[in-house]
């Protein structure tokens, strides 16, 4: 019996130790994490499940927005638009009455220096005084879609290993590894750096391969920042993400290949995630000025226009049903 108790106690200590190690690993990330930016939902009763024809039931459509990611969305940096219904039928002047800019800044989630996570802001956006005017003959099932289009940003951090001569003692692990996959951390957001790999590309050049992925909901879309969320095949801004290595190595900026509209130093430019597929960006750093071996953080910024939608059913009832012979 004593032996069994000793074994149980030992297993408990091992499990506790593993849990502590996992907590330590989790605490390494500077971000709260997550794969969403803004979330949207209909406020209960707005719209109601049923309304009546002949202008007898004014109602509202109200969206509840919450910032679940870690980028602040400034006032007017996106819009909400209701589609799926004819605005004229609902006593409005036109489609412009079913579109509103984001009315106030929606701050993102914050992870402070103590590891405490502070939740993001919440805001309501309401479309009021909708009232179905036509006289129906039979009930009409409609579908209301709320489109959300806004600018968002991801910050990704990785740790690169650099040294004076990349080809000498390449296998050393005394400080850090000069080749292979690297740790990466992403701020809460729907597009992220999903993998980082570094390798020497000569004695004084370090090559880094960044893989950028759409990790949000599959039906969501993204576009070039500050453009319309237009999913047509002819839209040249579709699937474009601004990619930029914002850190340097001892004053040397990254030089990346395959970028559109690249910065003069090639540290940033647009990349295309065709139909949401992963894209790799190859960058290099000149490390000829490095005088020792060390591990250093390097930050990447991703900017994009993000689109998502929610839908709900609305039954418009013919009040004349059963009242006419």
Image (cartoon, rainbow, N blue to C red):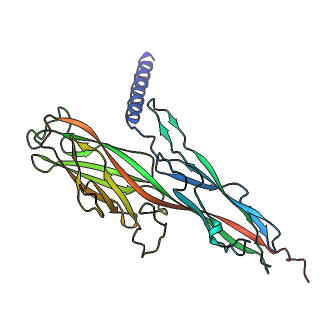
Residue 148 occupies quadrant: bottom right
Left or right of residue 317, residue 156 in this image: left
Q: In this view, does 193 lie to the left or right of 128?
A: left
Q: Position of residue 314 (x, y in %)?
A: 71, 67
Quick one: quadrant of the N terminus?
Answer: top left
Looking at the figure, which quarter contains the C terminus? bottom right
Q: Residue at x 28, y 49 (%)?
A: 196
The outermost residue toward the front is: 264
Residue pictured at 44% horizontal, 15% vertical: 2
Q: In which quarter of the image is residue 47?
A: bottom right
- The x and y percentages for residue 38 are 53, 52
- The residue at 47%/61% (across/down) is 218
The picture places residue 278, in percent across and down from the top left corner, at 34, 60
Instruction: Answer with left or right where residue 41 lies relative to residue 291.
Output: right
Q: In this view, does 103 lie above or below 293?
A: below
Q: Quadrant of residue 168?
A: top left
- Viewer-proximal residue among 289 and 1: 289
Residue 47, can we see it?
no
Q: Determine whether 231 is above or below 202 in the image.
A: below
Residue 192 position (above or below residue 15): below
234 vs 215, nearest the viewer: 234
The image shows residue 232 at horizontal and vertical percentages of: 46, 74
Query: Can residue 61 be seen in the rendering of this structure?
Result: yes
């Amino acid at each position: 019996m004593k032996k069994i108790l000793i074994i149980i106690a030992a297993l408990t200590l091992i499990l506790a130790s593993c849990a502590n190690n996992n907590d330590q690993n989790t605490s390494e990330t500077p971000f709260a994490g997550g794969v969403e930016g803004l979330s949207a939902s209909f406020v209960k009763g707005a719209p109601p499940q049923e309304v009546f024809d002949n202008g007898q039931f004014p109602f509202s459509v109200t969206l509840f927005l919450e910032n679940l990611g870690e980028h602040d969305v400034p006032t007017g940096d996106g819009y909400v638009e209701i589609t799926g219904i004819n605005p004229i039928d609902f006593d409005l002047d036109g489609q412009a009455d079913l579109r509103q800019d984001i009315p106030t800044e929606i701050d993102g989630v914050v992870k402070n220096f103590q590891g405490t996570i502070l939740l993001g802001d919440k805001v309501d956006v309401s479309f009021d005084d909708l009232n179905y005017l036509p006289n129906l003959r039979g009930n009409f099932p409609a579908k209301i879609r709320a489109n959300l289009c806004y600018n968002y940003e991801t910050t990704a951090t990785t740790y690169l290993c650099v040294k004076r001569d990349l080809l000498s003692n390449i296998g050393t692990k005394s400080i850090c590894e000069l080749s292979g996959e690297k740790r990466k951390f992403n701020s809460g957001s729907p597009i992220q750096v999903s993998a980082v790999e570094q390798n020497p590309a000569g004695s004084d050049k370090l090559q880094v391969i960044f893989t950028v992925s759409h990790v949000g909901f599959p039906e969501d879309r993204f576009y070039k920042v500050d453009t319309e969320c237009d999913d047509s095949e002819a839209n040249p801004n579709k699937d474009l993400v601004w990619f930029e290595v914002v850190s340097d190595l001892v004053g040397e900026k990254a030089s990346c290949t395959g970028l559109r509209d690249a910065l003069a130093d090639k540290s940033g430019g647009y990349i295309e995630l065709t139909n949401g597929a992963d894209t790799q960006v190859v960058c290099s750093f000149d490390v000829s000025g490095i005088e020792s071996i060390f591990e250093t953080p390097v930050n990447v910024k991703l900017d994009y226009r993000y689109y998502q939608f929610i839908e709900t059913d609305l039954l418009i009832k013919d009040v004349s049903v059963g009242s006419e012979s």
